[in-house]
Every structure is written in structure tokens, then in C-alpha cells.
Image (cartoon, grey):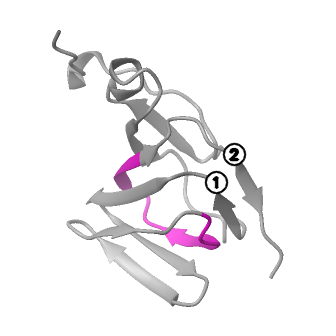
Amino acid sequence: MANMSLHKSAEWKPGLRTYFQYRDLGSVEATEGRLLVHVIRATESCSGPGGYHSHDLEFQMNYVLRGWTRVEFEDVGEVRFEAGDSWHQDPGTPHEVLEFSDDFEVIEICMPAEFPTRDEQR
């Protein structure tokens, strides 16, 4: 069976962060929850750092479609990502989104589709 997500009929929904909207690309249903591939886009201007946190998952990768973001990773430091850049972070890596452009849009791939997020102390 083919699973498709057409841009013209895309559903954008709220999610983990109130300043972003999320669009599932159909992978959750297609993989019975083993994989999440979604587009995340900014819905309001960045008002400051998003808070140091980590995710309990097996895999996480991001690819910037539009705009830019600054992210700080534990043991790496601050990195600015622009359209065309990507990153993979190891499971449980503490990180914080410091800033993003008003047109920021990223594809995120996670395994599994549902995972806990923990606030981290710095």
C-alpha cells in the first residue's frame, strides 16, 4: 500500500512546542508507530531559548528546509544550522534550541514515533 502526504491538503497540528506546528508525513501510521517523520515550522518569532532538554528515543535526525536555527548540545556547544544543513544527535543528548528564524522549517525523523522528553538541569 502507498502512503502519501500531499502538501495542498496538509494538516498542521500543535505539538511539543507551542511556537511550532507539526505535519506528520504519514510514517507513524505506515510503520505502526515505529518511525516519525514530520515537518516542523515556526509559527511565531523566537522569544528566547526553549529550555535545555533531552529525548528518550533510539534515533533522531533533523534536516533544515528553510531559515536557520541555533542549537546548543552538551559536550559540543553552540551550532548554527541553515537551510540544507542536518544533524543527528545520539539518544538522550541534552540540547537547547537557542534561536530560530521566523521562516524556520525542518524535517525531523525519530524512532520510535512517541518518546518522552525530559527537562535537563544545567
Q: Which residue is mark 1?
A: 56
Disc number for residue 16 = none
Quarter of the picture holding the N terminus: top left
**Label 2 sits on residue:** 116
Q: Which quarter of the rendered picture does the C terminus lie within?
A: bottom right
Most distant residue in the right direction: 121
User: What residue type is disc 1 on?
Assistant: Asp
Please tell me whether residue 107 belongs to the stretch shown in magenta.
Answer: yes
Q: Nearer the viewer, residue 33 or 45?
A: 33
In the image, farthest residue toward the top: 1
52 on left or right of 114: right
On the image, the x and y values in percent for residue 69 come to 43, 70
Number of labels in the image equals 2
Label 2 residue SS: loop
Which is more toward the observer, 46 or 29? Answer: 29
Determine the residue positioned at 51% across, 87% down: 78
Circles 2 and 1: CB atoms closer than 8 Å: yes
Q: Earlier in the sequence, mark 2 or mark 1?
A: 1
Check disc 1: other Cα within 10 Å, few if <14, some if 14-19, many if 20+.
some
Segment tinted magenta in the rendering: 92-109
